[in-house]
Each structure stands twice: as structure tokens, then as C-alpha cells.
Amino acid sequence: MKTDPEIMKSLMKEGRLLPQEEMLEIARKKGSLKIGVPKENTYQERRVALVPEAVSLLVANGHEILIETKAGENASFSDQAYSEAGAEIVYDRKAVFQCDIVFKVSPPIEEEVEMMKVGQTLISALQINLQPEMILQKMKEKKITAIAWDYMRDNDGHFPVVSAMGEIAGNTSIHIAAELLNAFKNGKGVMLGGIAGVQPTEVVILGAGTVGEFAARSALGLGCSVKVFDNSLGKLRRLQTGVGNRIYTSIIQPKVLSKALMRADVVIGAIRSSFGKTPCVVSSEMVSNMKEGAIIIDVSIDQGGCFETSEITNHKSPTFDKYGVTHFCVPNIASRVSRTASFAISNIFAPVLIEMGEKGGSKGLIKHNYGFRSGVYMYNGTLTSEVLGKIFDLDYKEIELLLMGM
């Protein structure tokens, strides 16, 4: 039997050769994937997992794509665009959830898990703080293999989807702040930025990761005075190197932070935790000492938020006032620009799904791709996430131990 030259190329790219028996096994298993993309039912989720351009690429590689009717409607993608790209448009929602691989944006809800069959693969976000234990139990019963795209890594060890959504959230958070300062939005009537002869708007950013970096770039581009706080000197150095010396950076010290908050017109919460829960670094007292009419954008709200005064809001009722400070605490900022966000997700996953087909399916990719394996939180119904295991007091096993038994 001849091995596929593309597989050989992929193996050489990884810098190692597999035993001949394993290469032949991969060659035998290589085949078509059946991928289902449902319309998102989560409140105010407007993104879609695959855009028509990605569907066209996957179909050209021999894969079958089922798209639930109107799945892309909220991101301005029509059923016709998907059909012309080679997808099958289905009107029976259950049919999408019967595909070998279900690819969606939001974590699954109970109704969706009920429609799934035994042994399926699910790719979606996880959102640890919002994941009900009941959903996990139902997934365990159906022996689901679940991959969280927010924990999946690339070849460089980065989180590609989180980074892409972080870029969007960072840029968009500054646009939101500018709108909330608008006098016609009951704001202070202050322009976010600076002009000659007028003191620039002061922006404080908590967190020097991707969200913080792109929020800082946007704010600096508008002419704002920007201060960034983080407990990682490495992140602060990288940020300062990337954006230049126009930016003030500091370790999070309560007294220094408190003074900065008192002067701030806008504060962006952009701290992200690897353990699913963002530390609260701004107390109610600190918020009460802020300027009246100041704006807080808590991008970290999906992990609990980094302000003691934060409470989850939504896109229809996005803000509330506390101590005279306007709070914006919507957990899904990327849905404001759903078309752009959908392209970002799709661009990352199209090559991943193609590689999955080359490896014989999700199990093959999990076995041979460490970055993809990093996102696995359930394997054949066995919980593999230590964080989820500790939160819900459930037994879990390391994915590497399970793979050794393959």
C-alpha cells in the first residue's frame, strides 16, 4: 500500500517520522468527515462556526458539511452562500446533531446534548464558570469526546481562538467606551482620545494579554493617555516593546492602582485566568472613588470579572450604574461583530479539520496533535479536565493516560 504524500509531508513538517505500521494505519484511516454546524440557540450568540469559504475548502478536501438552515443568518451568511459552497442545508435540527462531528460556537445546552448520539465528537467553547454539571453528566452517559476551542493550542503553544477573540474584544471594548461617553448615550460628552489644547482621555487597562494589548493599541491610536496594570513583568515588557514608550505600565499594587482609577475616564478589565476564575483586583471602595460618569468595560466577566461591582449584563441591556460609574459587563463582546468573529474562528479551524481528516478522525488528531489534545476536556465520556473535576467534585483522568490504552 502506498502512503499519501500529503501525510508524509505533514509528518516531515513535524520533524519526526512515525513507525511504518503507524503510518500505514493513518493512511488506511484517512477519509471523509461528516461535520454538522447548528444554528446557535444561546441567547445573543450571533457567530457561526464555519463560514462559506471554509465550507468550500473542506468540501474540496472530500468532507461532508451539514449546515442547519439560517445558521449563518446572524453573521450575514445566507443559506444560498453555504449551498453554493457545497454544504447540505438541513431543516431538521436533529440531523445536524447526528453528524460524527458537531462544530459550534457556544457550549452545548441540554436540548442539544439530548439530540446527540453515542460516541460523537463535539467542538465548541467551554466557558467553565457557565458549564452546568448536568450537561457534563449527560455527555458522559453518551460517551462524548469534547474539545474546548478556548483551551486548544497551536504549534507555538498559544491559544489561537482565544487570541483572535481577544483581539476583537480589545479593539471593540474601546469603541464601546467611546460610545458610552457620548452625551446622547447619557455619557459625560467626552471624546475618547485627545485633540490639541485639550487634556486627553485617561484609559486604565487591567491585564497585558491579548485583550489588553489591542485595547491599548486602539486607545493610543485615538490619542488617549493609557496605563496598563498586570502582575506579569514579562507581559508588561512585551507590551511596552510592542507599542512603544507612550504607554505607562505597572505591577498591580492597590495604592498605585487606586490612584490611577481615581483619574481614569475609562477602565478596561482584561485579566484572564488559566484556571477559569479571574481574580477580583478592584474593590467596591476603589470603584466608589472613581470619577462620576467614568466607564468600566469588564471583558473578564465570562470568568467572573475583575471588579467587585461587576454583574453579568447582555447586549440588549448592556450597562448599569454603581457609585455613578457606568458598568458594561457583557460576556460575549465578539458577537457585536459576528461576521468578523466567524471568519476568525473559521480560518483557524479549516486547516485543523482538514488535518483531522488526514489523521482518520478526531481520535487520530487527538493522538498525534498536542495542541488539539490540549483542548480535550472529555474523552469517550471520561472527564479529562482537572479544573472541571475539582469544580464539580468529579473523577477525571489525564488524557495522556487514556491514550496509552489505545
Image (tube, rainbow, N blue to C red):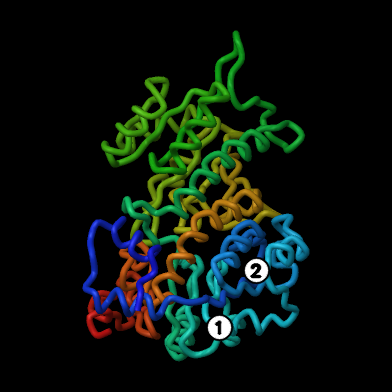
Q: Secondary structure at mark 1?
A: helix
- Measuring from the top left, give residue 183's x and y in whole percent: 73, 31
Number of other residues with Cα within 10 Å of mark 1, as a class: few under 14, some 14 to 19, many 20 or more: some
- Measuring from the top left, give residue 101's x and y in whole percent: 52, 77
Task: Residue at 50% x, 43% y: name it.
Answer: 167
Q: Nearer the viewer, residue 276 or 238?
A: 238
Q: Nearer the viewer, residue 53 or 302?
A: 53
Looking at the image, the residue that sits furthest to the top is 197
Q: Is residue 232 visible?
A: yes
For the residues marked 2 and 1, what is the alpha-carbon distance in whole angstroms?
13 Å
Question: Which image quadrant: the C terminus?
Answer: bottom left
Q: Is residue 182 left or right of residue 210?
A: right
Looking at the image, the residue that sits furthest to the front is 1
Q: Is residue 328 left or right of residue 136?
A: right
Question: Circle 1 sits on which residue?
Answer: 113
Task: Residue at 38% x, 46% y: name it.
Answer: 281
Q: Quadrant of residue 88?
A: bottom right
Q: Is residue 105 visible?
A: no
Question: Circle 2 sits on which residue?
Answer: 40
Which label sits on residue 97? none
Q: Which of the marked residues, 2 or 1, is nearer the chain's N terminus?
A: 2
Tell me the kind of residue under disc 2.
Answer: Glu
Say if 274 sits above or below 243 in the image: below
Say if 258 sits above or below 320 in the image: above
Q: Nearer the viewer, residue 300 or 93?
A: 93
- Measuring from the top left, give residue 217's x and y in whole percent: 49, 31
Q: Secondary structure at mark 2?
A: loop
Say if 305 sits above or below 325 in the image: below
Question: Which image quadrant: the N terminus?
Answer: bottom left
- Measuring from the top left, give residue 247's x and y in whole percent: 41, 24
Tell me the kind of residue under disc 1.
Answer: Val
Number of other residues with Cα within 10 Å of mark 2, as a class: few under 14, some 14 to 19, many 20 or more: many
